[in-house]
Amino acid sequence: MYGIVNDSMNKGMIMDSEDRIERTVDIYISAEAVRDMKHKKDTEDFNTTKTQTPQHTGSDGVNIRSSKAAVVCLVLLCVFLLTAVIVLCVTFTQERQQIITKITNLAEERDQLLTNNKNLTQEREQLRTNNMNLTKERNQLLTNNMNLTKERNQLLNNNLNLTQEREQLLTNNMNLTQEREQLRTNNMNLTQERNQLLTNILNVTKERDQLKSEKNELQKLFAGGWKCHQSSLYFLSSETKSWSGSRKYCTDKKADLISINNQEEQDFVKNISGGKLVWIGLTDTDVEGTWKWVDRSNMTFRFWETGQQNNIEEDCALTRSTGWADFPCGNKYNWICEKSIFK
């Protein structure tokens, strides 16, 4: 520690000395510059005086006196600068000597402190030796008392340790009980979450299988000539049957005869049928003159040909390029089945 302090103080003093040396060098340089400037001016004045033609007039005396005054000023300036340099050198020498003296004093103080520390260490070791000897003597004299005291202290320590251990065990037991309850709660939550995930997986699996089944069914339907329009599938037969036979064919395919509910669907039917006579799911067999679709819904859209619904013996409807017409249900025509794509 003392070495670090001395090093820090020495570094600070050396830096101060370097600053003073730099200032002294700057003063020397400034003085040299002034002397060079004055010397150059005097040389120019001398040369000018030599080149001029001497005239013995009154102004010559004035010039001579001015030159002498300049020389005197220059000499005084040099004396002043020399004095300043000497003073700075003396000051620098004194400060340097003071720094050296301080360093020497600090080194001596450090050595003195080291000596004191060594002496104190030796004294401490001596005291330790004396104390150890006295302790041995005391222990020898008080052996019986020491043994009893040790035994008592041992019992007290054991009792204290057992008490602390019991408290620690009680605390651990309480913490473990709380942890067990927390784990039970977490386990129950995880079990519920697992069951929920299993249920979700089962539902998703069922939904996936359902979608696969529907996909396969749709592929089969498309391969069998079914066509998709909006949210429904349509099938135009290539053979002819009665209205009831046509409907039975559709219901066997989990469909029914088509129900036309808007102009767009009518145009679609006209497009795929090519103007053929095809049965549609419209009939008034229940109540004569009250036409209903096969799903028992009322007819909201009408596309009857002009003059149709003209025979009470014609209870089933078909469509053709010119619109709807009622025909005997036993006649055999093509038909169009319809089923929802989502069923």
Image (tube, grey):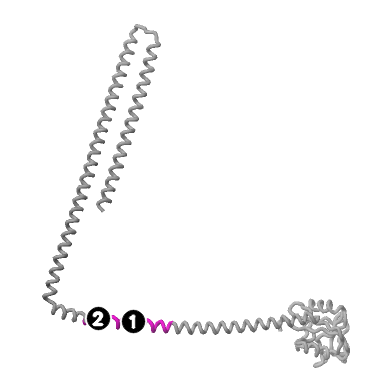
Residue at the limit of the structure toward the top, as seen here: 56
Q: Is residue 167 left or right of residue 309?
A: left
Q: Quadrant of residue 142?
A: bottom left
Q: Residues within 10 Å of mark 2 (few under 14, many from 20)?
A: few
Image x and y of residue 328, in percent? 87, 90
Q: Which mark is residue 171?
A: 1
* Magenta stretch: includes residue 166: yes
Q: Residue at x 30, y 18 (%)?
A: 69
State the predominant SS element of the stretch in magenta: helix
Judging depth in this view, the residue of 1 and 300 nearest the camera is: 1
Q: Please tell me how many numbered marks the rendered image carries.
A: 2
Judging depth in this view, the residue of 303 and 189 nearest the camera is: 189
Q: Which mark is residue 142?
A: none
Nearer the N terminus, badge 2 or badge 1?
A: 2
Q: Which mark is residue 160?
A: 2
Image x and y of residue 37, in percent? 37, 23
Magenta-colored span: 155-182
Q: Is residue 202 left or right of residue 328?
A: left
Q: Amino acid at mark 1?
A: Thr
Secondary structure of the residue carrying numbered label 1: helix
Image x and y of residue 251, in percent? 77, 89
Q: Residue at x 22, y 44 (%)?
A: 104
Compared with 329, 216 (above or below) is: above
Q: Amino acid at mark 2?
A: Leu
